[in-house]
Image (cartoon, rainbow, N blue to C red):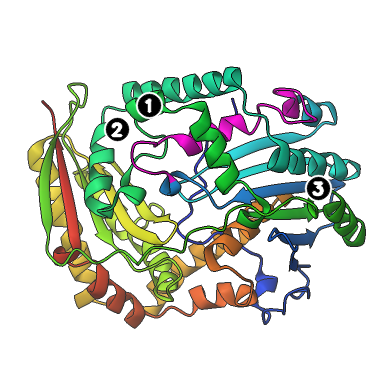
Amino acid sequence: MPFKGRWTWGWAAALTSVLLLPAPASGQKSGSLPLTHYRLKNGLNVILSEDFTLPVVSVAVAYDVGSVHEPQGKTGMAAVMENLMFSGSANVPPRQHFNYINRVGGTFNALLMEDRTVFYQTVPSNRLSLVLWLESDRMRFLEIGSRAFEDARAAILEDLRDRRAGDPYYDGARAFDQLLYSDFAHSHSLYGSEEDVRGLTLDDLRAFYAARYGPNNAVLCITGNFDKLKARELISQYFETLPRGRDAAPAAEPLALARKQVVTTFAGSPSSAAPAFHLGFRLTAPRSVDFYTLTILDYVLLRGRSSRITRRLLNPDAKIAYQLSGGIEKRRDRSVYKIFVIANNETMAERCQSALFAELDRLKSSPLSEEALGRYKAMFKQDFMGRLSTTVDRALYLTDFFLSLGDFQEFGLELDKYLSVTPADIVGIVARYFSPENSIILNVRTK
């Protein structure tokens, strides 16, 4: 079974400093970072970025499909489908995709998220044609047999049971998502419910594949040591004749702000001995210009030991929280800010909530100095520039960028937009989104 991960670094990932140069037109290069984007007649978006440092090439195929595309009563299809994409196709025997890549010394993986599914592999440069053949074959000729379907469904059911058994706060997190997102498409579990997964049929998955896994709903990205003209010839050979699938539905409306504070309590698992709470704020649409400031604010609040909330709640001298996590979460056209805290007792949980809102109020009443904000932006820049250390990192970033924004018009300006955030911008964003009136709190208490 392929790895299921979540590649979530807020809304944006990273690029190198050469992206400070003006963004190129499609098919041009951005400074010293080669970047070519074009679209086949069947709708497949293609991204090429050469890097001749090592004799390897990475290929990522990202489909605009995830749990947000599942209808009510049919949850878990994206997770089952991720497994089925390795079940064999007209020209590739079941599970042999792994062997083809392993035999040439390559690596592969898959990434399932609420709003996309990505398959990626890195191989020696002279094996690029092998990967393109494998990806095109399962894009058009995937064979979903009853045995493969039963195995994939059983794997997801086992995964769901393991998650619930291993995380006493799992059900509380699912209940919190239903409060925070307010609509079924965005609020249900990434892996579905056990009841829905058990009820899925072979016809359900075949229809889901036909509707969502066509070239017009995908992005193909190649990065690394390859000849661009030869790569385009191979792409034409393997992908040009694939028929279009169904056109994707338009994006939903942005998530409305909460307007009034919502506070409720969830009876947790008996094994969740420590009280906890989820705190969430609804944000603007992910493509909004506010996301540059929101991303820097995330560093101010939660990224690293020097972040404001981390210092306040996990300070060794006055530790009032046992565990702290959170950040920006994006699910296609919706986005939220989440904070999860586990405390030692209910009194400490209440103190943590008060401390959180006190820190947010302090950011509004006592703006950050340019020097302090500069330190957070320096941390962000280091992460931003470090995310392309390998060809596969670059492939994942480029597909994410394109699926998030739909083009590369602002590609070369990204880093500068983050680094131009001012203390006044932070104050405005905190006031707009991080008020008690826009907060949703789910207290988790033991049964």
In the rendered view, does 395 fall on the left or right side of 263?
right
Which mark is first along the chain, 3 or 2? 3
Which mark is first along the chain, 2 or 1? 1
The residue segment tinted magenta is 70-98
Dot 1 amino acid type: Arg
Dot 2 amino acid type: Tyr
Judging by the rendered image, the residue that carries numbered circle 3 is 57
Q: Position of residue 152 (x, y in %)?
A: 54, 24
What secondary structure is the stretch in magenta mostly built from? Answer: loop
Q: How many other residues sit within 10 Å of disc 3, few (<14), some (14-19) or many (≥20)? A: many
Alpha-carbon distance for marks 2 and 3? Answer: 38 Å
Looking at the image, residue 379 lies above or below residue 27: above
Q: Residue at x 12, y 64 (%)?
A: 260
**Does the magenta-highlighted stretch encompass residue 343?**
no
Which quadrant would residue 400 be assigned to in this image?
bottom right
Q: Residue at x 52, y 19 (%)?
A: 150
The kind of secondary structure element at disc 2 is helix
Q: Nearer the viewer, residue 371 or 96?
A: 96
Dot 3 amino acid type: Val
Judging by the rendered image, the residue that carries numbered circle 2 is 170
Identify the image quadrant of the N terminus: top right
Q: Are marks 1 and 2 in contact (CB under 8 Å)?
A: yes
Judging by the rendered image, the residue that carries numbered circle 1 is 163
Q: Is residue 356 visible?
A: yes
Q: Is residue 322 visible?
A: no
